[in-house]
Amino acid sequence: MSVFRDDFLWGGACAANQFEGAWDVDGKGPSVPDMCTNGSYATPKWITTSIHPDKLYPSHEAIDFYHHYEEDIALFAEMGFKTFRTSINWTRIFPTGMETEPNEKGLEFYDKVFDCCKKHGIEPLVTISHYEMPYALAEKYNGWASRELIDLYMNYCKVIFERYKDKVKYWLTFNEINSGTMPLGMVLSTGLVKGYEGPVNEAPDDKQGRFQALHHMFVASAKAVQYAHEHYPQFRMGCMICFITSYPLTPDPADVLANQKQMQITNWFCSDMHVRGEYPYYMKRFFAENGITIQQEPEDATILKAGVVDFYTFSYYMSNCITTHKDVEAVGGNIVQGAKNPYLKASDWGWQIDPIGLRYSLNEIYDRYHIPLMVVENGLGAYDKKSEDGKIHDSYRIDYLRAHIEQMAEAVKDGVDLMGYTPWGCIDLVSASTGEMAKRYGFIYVNKFDDGTGDLSREKKDSFYWYQKVIATNGEDLG
Ligand code: BGP
């Protein structure tokens, strides 16, 4: 007997700006990621203030899901997907974010995508804003630094809610909102990039601006949730957190405390805002010690309380160690760096692989909130090489996913209410952190390379057939 519930949402996850391409087709406007060049593990990608003809911008074509969506969704269906997590490109609907009328052609595209999902019995799970905002809003308002963004985001939400009310039930307001607690969130999510051109990891950090931007995003999220609950009671509204579990590197109480602080600021702060609808007590001291003052309107507290989410989703790739000790070996990570854990191995990109940490995280989150959880990103970014038989034998990816699903099963046995699982980049796509194609996550290989070449043809990897079996047995056969 499977431990996962009968209606468990097995599927996969992608984001519009990382796989759709067609960046200027059918009236779409440029987004912040459309201004980002390619990079690699060693060389950071850049954000530019205009498009340089001599540079490569990977989101412009990406894997061209825009023109391949029927073929791709058919492949997802063949794997047995019950759900498909994707996002809507805000700039397809409102090219600058400031129009009064939406772009009909953009709306039609998502009609076709969601209809195609329905045809295959796949439930869409839609991220409203996944690391993508109109570049015009970054230029004019310095992104979420401005309160104006709340109304503009609401205009966008109202249009897509009404248009897709019969097609989409599950919505996530912002992808990995907590990346705004870290400097990398300047470019990725808060859009504080007005006038900045240079490597994304060197954008001058504006801590005050980031936390003010987060406040605006929390209010926007809460307003969207409240509006959805009032007008579309069938909707289920969720948050999405980049959950980076960290451990104290040593039993030194100073390390334990440092880790507790780290967990509070990077993981729990944004989670608490979404689920409990108010600033947690520990932020007062953090703001005071960091010279941060949050400008709030009198109505904000009520809005935040009224717009708490129905379910909690998160990405989980790795864990980290925190220490107060000097001279320890550092490691990389998706949005946060830490100390090397001697018990774990890391991916080729330095992300420490920790399946047990997923069970631990699921228990920690569920214990705190007691609302349904979903793992909406997980996976191994790896270099895939074709074997002599011309196929991709990605046993390393299967091993990674199997180990994580095993730990999800343990968490369910622990009593955690887990709704579903959508591994990241179920079809190869552009990496968010580096802009590479070479960092592949997919069950489906796409013939597209870092230099922009490739015929975009799709091929099934070994993991495709493995995941098909996992879904068919509701997670019982992980062999
Ligand atoms: C998450 C993002 C995704 C995705 C993933 C993998 O942080 O939500 O957009 O890209 O990480 O990261 P990367 O693409 O950098 O390997």
Image (cartoon, helix red, strand yellow):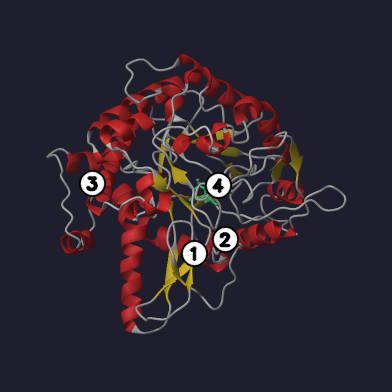
Q: Residues within 10 Å of mark 4 (few under 14, many from 20)?
A: many
Q: Residues within 10 Å of mark 1 (few under 14, many from 20)?
A: some
Where is mark 2, residue-wise? 349
Mark 2: secondary structure? loop
Q: Amino acid type of disc 3?
A: Gln
Residue labelled 2 has its Cβ within 8 Å of some atom of ligand 1: yes
The answer to whether one can see residue 230 in this image is no
**Of callouts 4 and 1, which one flags the residue occurring earlier in the amino acid sequence?**
1
Mark 4: secondary structure? loop
Where is mark 3, residue-wise? 212
Where is mark 1, residue-wise? 332
Where is mark 4, residue-wise? 431
Measured in 3D between alpha carbons, the distance from the residue under mark 2 to the one under mark 3, in whole angstroms, is 31 Å
**Of callouts 2 and 1, which one flags the residue occurring earlier in the amino acid sequence?**
1
Q: Are marks 4 and 1 in contact (CB under 8 Å)?
A: no
- Where in the figure is residue 279, as x and y percent of width and height? 22, 53
Quarter holding the C terminus is bottom right
Measured in 3D between alpha carbons, the distance from the residue under mark 2 to the one under mark 4, in whole angstroms, is 11 Å
- Where in the figure is residue 432, as x and y percent of width and height? 51, 46
**Of callouts 3 and 1, which one flags the residue occurring earlier in the amino acid sequence?**
3
Say whether residue 223 is left or right of residue 89: left
Q: Amino acid type of disc 2?
A: Trp
**Picture layout, residue 321 above or below residue 386:** below
**Of callouts 2 and 3, which one flags the residue occurring earlier in the amino acid sequence?**
3
Q: Amino acid type of disc 1?
A: Gly
**Picture layout, residue 107 above or below residue 425:** above
